[in-house]
Image (cartoon, helix red, strand yellow):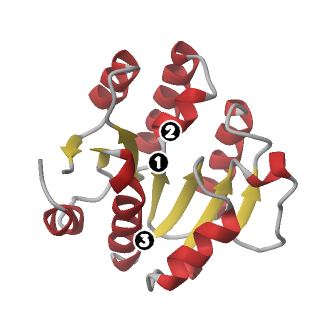
């Protein structure tokens, strides 16, 4: 296991196109998310954030409070629409809910095609998405997403909360990633 500073250093040195699964505890997940997005945007990459744990407005405010360049971020918000909390902005697309995997996939495809330059995809909570989806369906969804990333030369970071459940899905996702990092 590594600490947050070592994580930042590892992420800074990632080769282009690498896909990393970060495993952490629930109490560290947001700190890890902020650090990861900060490092990736500082590498001059544009980020597509698939947010299953925080609504757009809260996420953007947190990014701004932590000096993350929100001009390099596009958010696929999987929460706000189901709560009637949509906010008009150029860098967000609302998906019905976390279980709308087809819509998430289509929106992600659209972002990949329309956002210029180097990009990365950040999925803030595999664990939250698993709560709302059948494990075997979600595993197929993740396989499809990771394959699209590889075909387009896009790197990414996935956050997975350490727990005893869904170890099979975690194992399937991990085998599709280039690196798995456990964070204390």
Q: Position of residue 167 (x, y in %)?
A: 33, 20
Specify whether 44 is left or right of 46.
left
Q: Are marks 2 and 1 in contact (CB under 8 Å)?
A: yes
Q: Closer to the camera, 56 or 89?
A: 56
- Mark 3 or mark 1: whose residue is earlier in sequence: 3
Residue most toward the front?
27
Residue 66 lies in quadrant: bottom left
Q: Secondary structure at mark 1?
A: loop
Residue at 52% in and 20% down: 140
Residue 49 in the figure: left or right of residue 83: left
How far apart are the two marked residues, 3 and 1, measured between alpha carbons?
14 Å
Circle 2: element type: helix
- Is the residue 61 above or below the residue 166 in the image? below
Q: Which residue is mark 3?
A: 45
Q: How far is mark 3 from mark 2, CA to CA?
A: 18 Å
Label 3 with label 2: CB-CB less than 8 Å: no
Query: Residue 33: image x %, image y %?
Result: 40, 60
**First of labels 3, 2 by sequence position:** 3
Which residue is the site of mark 2?
148
Residue that appears at 44% across and 41% down: 151
Q: Mark 2: give few (<14), some (14-19) or many (20+) Cα within 10 Å.
A: some
Residue under the point 56% across and 79% down: 70
- Looking at the image, residue 142 lies above or below residue 17: above
Q: Secondary structure at mark 3?
A: loop
Q: Which residue is mark 1?
A: 152
Q: Is residue 13 above or below residue 128?
A: below
Dot 3 crowding, Cα within 10 Å, few <14, some 14–19, many 20+: some
Q: Is residue 104 above or below residue 46?
A: above
Residue appearing at x 88%, y 54% in the figure? 84
Few, some or many residues within 10 Å of mark 1 (<14, 14–19, 20+): few
Location of residue 89 (image quadrant): bottom right
């Amino acid at each position: 296991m590594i600490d947050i500073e070592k994580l930042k250093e590892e992420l800074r040195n990632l080769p282009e196109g690498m896909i990393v699964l970060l495993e952490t505890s629930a109490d560290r997940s947001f700190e890890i998310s902020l650090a990861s997005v900060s490092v990736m945007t500082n590498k001059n990459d544009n980020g597509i954030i698939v947010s299953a744990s925080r609504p757009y407005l809260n996420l953007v405010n947190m990014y701004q409070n932590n000096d993350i360049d929100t001009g390099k971020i596009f958010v696929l918000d999987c929460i706000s629409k189901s709560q009637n909390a949509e906010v008009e902005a150029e860098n967000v697309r609302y998906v019905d809910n976390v279980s709308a995997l087809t819509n998430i996939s289509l929106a992600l495809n659209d972002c990949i095609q329309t956002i210029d330059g180097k990009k990365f995809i950040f999925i803030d909570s595999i664990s939250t998405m698993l709560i709302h989806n059948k494990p075997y369906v979600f595993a197929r969804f993740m396989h499809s997403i990771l394959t699209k990333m590889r075909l387009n030369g896009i790197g990414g970071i996935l956050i997975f909360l350490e727990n005893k459940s869904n170890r099979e899905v975690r194992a399937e996702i991990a085998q599709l990633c280039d690196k798995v990092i456990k964070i204390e």
